[in-house]
Image (cartoon, grey):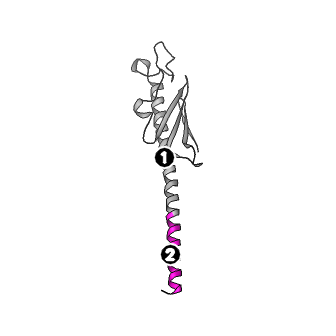
Amino acid sequence: MGQQQLLLIVLGVIVVGIAVVVGINLFNANAVSSNRDAVVSDLNNLGAMAQQYYKKPISMGGGGNTFDGSSATGGVAWVIPAQLDTTANGTYTATVNAQSVVIVGLGTEKGNDNTAPVKATATVSPTAITVSTQN
């Protein structure tokens, strides 16, 4: 083979190698973004469940206008349903107060800093759900 052909082969191998590395990086970035979106979606779903509990009367198994069930004797605080506290998207924990719930979701993918998992926090009030993401 001539020198020109060898140079073209080496150049082709380098271009293919760079394309593979870029493809892997794009795939990983997409996985992180997808996991973050899924955690936020789960938090919105859990927040809606908490609001539903808040608005439902205690006699029907709800909170009677509180998240912690403190509006009447025998009320029970809202909890994340057992089948939803750990999903394929991540794990979720809730801190329940009388007029708010804070739900923290930890995803299954490493976040932007590549050390800690994707994290999002939902603050649920009787009329709003606010979600913020970290990492």
Kindly identify which residue carries mark 2.
12
In this view, the residue in front, 48 or 134, is: 134
The local crowd at label 2, few if under 14, some if 14 to 19, many if 20 or more residues have their Cα within 10 Å, is: few
Against 116, is 79 above or below?
above
Mark found first going from the N terminus, 1 or 2: 2
Q: Residue at x 48, y 46 (%)?
A: 35
Q: What residue type is labelled 1?
A: Asn
User: What residue is shown with label 1?
Assistant: 35
- Amino acid type at image mark 2: Gly
Towards the viewer: 105 or 130: 105
Residue 60 belongs to the span the image colors magenta: no
> Which residue is most to the top?
73
Q: What element carries label 1?
A: helix
Check disc 1: other Cα within 10 Å, few if <14, some if 14-19, many if 20+: many
Tell me if residue 33 comes above or below residue 58 in the rendering: below
* Rendered location of residue 116, percent (x, y): 57, 43
Residue displayed at 50% across by 73% down: 13
The answer to whether residue 2 is seen in the rendering is yes
Picture coordinates of residue 63, whole percent (x, y): 47, 21
Give the residue drawn at x 52%, y 39%: 106
Which span is picked out in magenta? 1-20
> Residues under labels 1 and 2: Cα distance?
35 Å
Q: Residue 104 carries which label?
A: none
